[in-house]
Image: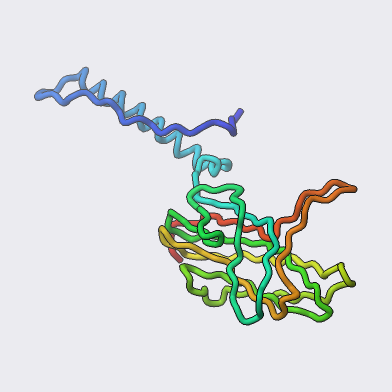
Amino acid sequence: MTNFYQQLQTPAVPDLPNPQDRYDRLTVAQTNGALRTFFLKLTNALQSIASPRGGRFINNPYGAFQDGTDQTAANTTTAYAITFDTTDFNNGVTLSNSSRLNVSQAGIYNIQFSVQLVNTTNASVDVDIWFCKNGTNIDKSNSRFGLAPRKSVGDPFHFIGAMNFFVSLSSGDYVELMWRTSDVGAYIEHYAASSTPTRPSIPSVITTVTFVSNLSA
C-alpha cells in the first residue's frame, strides 16, 4: 500500500573508493555497488515525484494574506493600495509596507483576491480593482465591479469582488492591489463574528499568491 505521507530523502553522494593504478576487481565491485545504490535511490525519488501524488514533495513559493479593517476612500480621483494586517501562510512570499506582496523566487505567479465591497448610497456605484507591479500599473489587469444601491438605511448592498491574474515576477519584485470608487459611500468593509448561528468573521480582503512556473511565457 502506498504511503502518501512519506517524506522524500535526497540520496547522499556515493562514497567511492580511490582509483587504483592497476585494475582491481574488488575496487571495481565496490565502485559499482556504491553507484548502483545511489542511482536506485535517485530513481525511487524521481518516481515518487512523477507519481499521481508526487506534488506533495514539491516545495513551491506561496502566500495567503487578509485584512480585518474597513478600507475607505477620501475621494474618487485617487488610486488607493489595498492593505493587509494578517499573514496566514507564507513561503517565499512576504508582506511589507502593509500592501506589498514580495516574492523571493522569480517565476509566473497566480494572484487571487476576494474583496468585500459595500455600497451605502442610494445610487449605483462602480469600484475598480487592478494590479500594480513595483509601483507601475499592469496593463489590462483592471476589473470593474458594479454595486447596486443600498437596500435601506443601515442595510448596505454587499458584493464580493473576486479575480485572479497571472503575473511574471523577478526575484525581489512586489505586487499591490489598487482600487478606486466612483463614490466614497462605497468602500471595503470587514464584519466581526456573528451568532445565531455562530459564524466566522468576514475579512475585508483575502489574497493568495501561488507560484505557477519558473518558465516565462
- Location of residue 159 (image quadrant): bottom right
Q: Residue 210's x, y, as percent?
A: 55, 55
Height in image: 129 above or below 28?
below
- Location of residue 125 (image quadrant): bottom right
Task: Determine the residue positioned at 45% across, 39% down.
Answer: 46
Q: Nearer the viewer, residue 176 or 16?
A: 176
Q: Residue 149's x, y, as percent?
A: 83, 76
Task: Give the quarter of the figure containing the N terminus.
Answer: top right
Q: Is residue 183 found left or right of 123 in the rendered image?
A: left
Q: Nearer the viewer, residue 49 or 72?
A: 72
Task: Determine the residue positioned at 30% across, 25% down.
Answer: 34
- Location of residue 40 (image quadrant): top left
Height in image: 166 above or below 192?
below
Q: Can residue 135 be seen in this snapshot?
A: yes
Q: Is residue 167 found left or right of 11 in the rendered image?
A: right
Q: Can residue 143 be seen in this snapshot?
A: no
Q: Residue 148's x, y, as percent?
A: 81, 76
- Extreme-front residue of the structure: 74
Q: Is residue 24 found left or right of 206 in the rendered image?
A: left
Task: Determine the residue positioned at 26% across, 21% down.
Answer: 30
- Extreme-top residue of the structure: 26
Q: Residue 199's x, y, as percent?
A: 82, 49
